[in-house]
C-alpha cells in the first residue's frame, strides 16, 4: 500500500509475534480464519479499499482527530505534553477506527452480518454504529453482569438496530462474551463476520486490528512534525487488549521513542500474568496454577480483560515497549487533573495513562521531555460512576 504505516513487528505466516500469537481455534473455525486472512491481505494492498476506509473515517467518524498541546499540565510537570484526541472520534473513542475497517471488509467478503463481543459496551456500540451505517445485521454478545452494569449501552445498541444477547455462562462477563461470540461464529461463518474489538484472538485478528488502528500513529507522527516535534521522547497509552496502544505505537515503532503501555493493576497481564492460551491466541494471561483464567478487576470496565494482545506480549518480552500498572486510587486523581487543568474529561481507561505520566514526571520522565499521550476516549460514559465513588456511595 502507498502510505503504509511503520510496522511494529510483522507476525510470521502463522501469526506468531515471537513466541506469542498463533491460531488456536477449533477445526470448524480454521476455514473462516484463513478466508479472513486472505481477504484482509488482499484488501489492505488495494488502494481502492484503503481510500474508502479513509474516506469513511473522514466523512463519518471525525478523522483526523487533532493533537492538543496540554500547556497547564506541561508547566506543572516541567515536560511538553501533547494529547492525540481519540475522544473526539465518533462514538467517543478509538474503537470506531477498527470497526469501520472490519465492516468494510465484511462487505467486501460478501457477508451481510456482523457479530461482536463487548465488555463495558463501547465496542458493541461502535460495531452497532458501523453496522447501521452500512446496512448490516448486528448481534452483540455481552456478559449478563455487564448488561446490568451498563444498561444504558445496551439501550444505545438497540437504538442503533442491533440485537444484544446476554451471556449467562461462566462469570457472565467479557471473557465469556468472547467465548459465546466464537461459538456463534462457528455456526454461521458463511454469512457472518466476527468483529473482534481489540488486538487479540486468533491470527489474523491481532495484525488486522493493529493495522486498522495504526492510523492513530500515522496521523500523530505527521501532526507532531507540523508542531515542530520530530519525534517524541515517550509515547504513552493505556492497555486493555491493547488496540489503542498498538495503533499509536505503530507510528513510532521505528524511532527511538520510549513506548509505554499502562495496564490497570487489577488486570495487569504483563505484570502479573504468565504465558497461556485463551481466545485463540498465546499470550500473557492472568491465570491460576491450573491455567484457569482469573477475573480481572479494575475501576474501568474497558481494562477488565485477563489477557493482552500477543504483539504486546512480544514487545514486552523483547523490551521494545515497557508495561507498567496503575491502581484504581491513582486513576481518579488523574481524571480530575486533566479535567481541571485542561478542560478534558477523559475515560477512566485513559486516566490510567495520565496517572502514570503524573507519577513519573521528574522521575523516569526527564524534565523537558516531549510526551505524547494517546487520549483513547472521553469520560462522559464514566461520570455517573465517578460521582458515586467521589461521594463515597460506590
Ligand atoms: C475499550 C477502551 C480501551 C481499552 O481497549 P484497548 O484495546 O486496549 O485500546 C481504552 N480506552 C477506551 C476509551 C476504551 O473505550
Image (cartoon, rainbow, N blue to C red):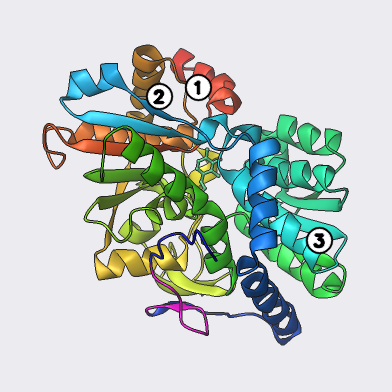
> Disc 1 beta carbon < 8 A from ligand 1?
no
Q: How far from the left and from the top, in percent, is residue 247?
A: 46, 52
Q: Is residue 199 visible?
A: no
Residue at (27, 16) in percent of width and height: 72
- Quarter of the figure that contains the N terminus: bottom right
Q: Nearer the viewer, residue 87 or 196?
A: 87
Q: How far from the left and from the top, in percent, is residue 87?
A: 53, 31
Q: How far from the left and from the top, in percent, is residue 140?
A: 77, 51
Q: Are marks 1 and 3 in contact (CB under 8 Å)?
A: no
**Considering only order in the chain, which callout, 3 or 1, is on the residue closer to the N terminus?**
3
Residue at (83, 51) in percent of width and height: 138
Name the residue that disc number 3 marks.
107
The image quadrant of residue 71 is top left
Of the residues tagged 1 and 3, which is closer to the observer? 3
Is 25 in the magenta? no
Q: Are marks 2 and 1 in contact (CB under 8 Å)?
A: yes
Q: Nearer the viewer, residue 217 or 15?
A: 217
Q: Nearer the viewer, residue 212 or 280?
A: 212
Q: How far from the left and from the top, in percent, is residue 337?
A: 34, 19
Amino acid at each position: 500500500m502507498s502510505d503504509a504505516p511503520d510496522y511494529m513487528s510483522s507476525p510470521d505466516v502463522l501469526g506468531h509475534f515471537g513466541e506469542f500469537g498463533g491460531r488456536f481455534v477449533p477445526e470448524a473455525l480454521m476455514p473462516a480464519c484463513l478466508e479472513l486472512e486472505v481477504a484482509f491481505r488482499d484488501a489492505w494492498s488495494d488502494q481502492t479499499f484503503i481510500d474508502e476506509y479513509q474516506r469513511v473515517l473522514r466523512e463519518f467518524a471525525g478523522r483526523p482527530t487533532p493533537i492538543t498541546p496540554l500547556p497547564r499540565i506541561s508547566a506543572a510537570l516541567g515536560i511538553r505534553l501533547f494529547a492525540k484526541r481519540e475522544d473526539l472520534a465518533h462514538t467517543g473513542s478509538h474503537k470506531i477506527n477498527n470497526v469501520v475497517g472490519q465492516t468494510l471488509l465484511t462487505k467486501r467478503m460478501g457477508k451481510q452480518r456482523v457479530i461482536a463481543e463487548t465488555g463495558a459496551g463501547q465496542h458493541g456500540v461502535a460495531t452497532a454504529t458501523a453496522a447501521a451505517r452500512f446496512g448490516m445485521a448486528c448481534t452483540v454478545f455481552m456478559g449478563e453482569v455487564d448488561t446490568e452494569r451498563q444498561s444504558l449501552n445496551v439501550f444505545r445498541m438497540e437504538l442503533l438496530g442491533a440485537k444484544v444477547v446476554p451471556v449467562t455462562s461462566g462469570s457472565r462477563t467479557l471473557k465469556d462474551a468472547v467465548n459465546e461470540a466464537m461459538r456463534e461464529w462457528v455456526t454461521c461463518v458463511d454469512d457472518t463476520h466476527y468483529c473482534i474489538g481489540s488486538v487479540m484472538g486468533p491470527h489474523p485478528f491481532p495484525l488486522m486490528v493493529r493495522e486498522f488502528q495504526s492510523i492513530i500513529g500515522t496521523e500523530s507522527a505527521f501532526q507532531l512534525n507540523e508542531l515542530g516535534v520530530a519525534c517524541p521522547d515517550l509515547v504513552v497509552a493505556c492497555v486493555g487488549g491493547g488496540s489503542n496502544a498498538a495503533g499509536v505505537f505503530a507510528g513510532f515503532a521505528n524511532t527511538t521513542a520510549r513506548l509505554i503501555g499502562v495496564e490497570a493493576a487489577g488486570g495487569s497481564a504483563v505484570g502479573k500474568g504468565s504465558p497461556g492460551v485463551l481466545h485463540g491466541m498465546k499470550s500473557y494471561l492472568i491465570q491460576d496454577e491450573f491455567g484457569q483464567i482469573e477475573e480481572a478487576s479494575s475501576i474501568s470496565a474497558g481494562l477488565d480483560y485477563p489477557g493482552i494482545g500477543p504483539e504486546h506480549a512480544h514487545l514486552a518480552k523483547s523490551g521494545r515497549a515497557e508495561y507498567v500498572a496503575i491502581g484504581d486510587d491513582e486513576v481518579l486523581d488523574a481524571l480530575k487533573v486533566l479535567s481541571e487543568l485542561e478542560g478534558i474529561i477523559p475515560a477512566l481507561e485513559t486516566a490510567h495513562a495520565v496517572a502514570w505520566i503524573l507519577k513519573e514526571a521528574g522521575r523516569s520522565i526527564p524534565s523537558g521531555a516531549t510526551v505524547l499521550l494517546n487520549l483513547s476516549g472521553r469520560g462522559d460514559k464514566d461520570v455517573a460512576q465517578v460521582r458515586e465513588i467521589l461521594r463515597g456511595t460506590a
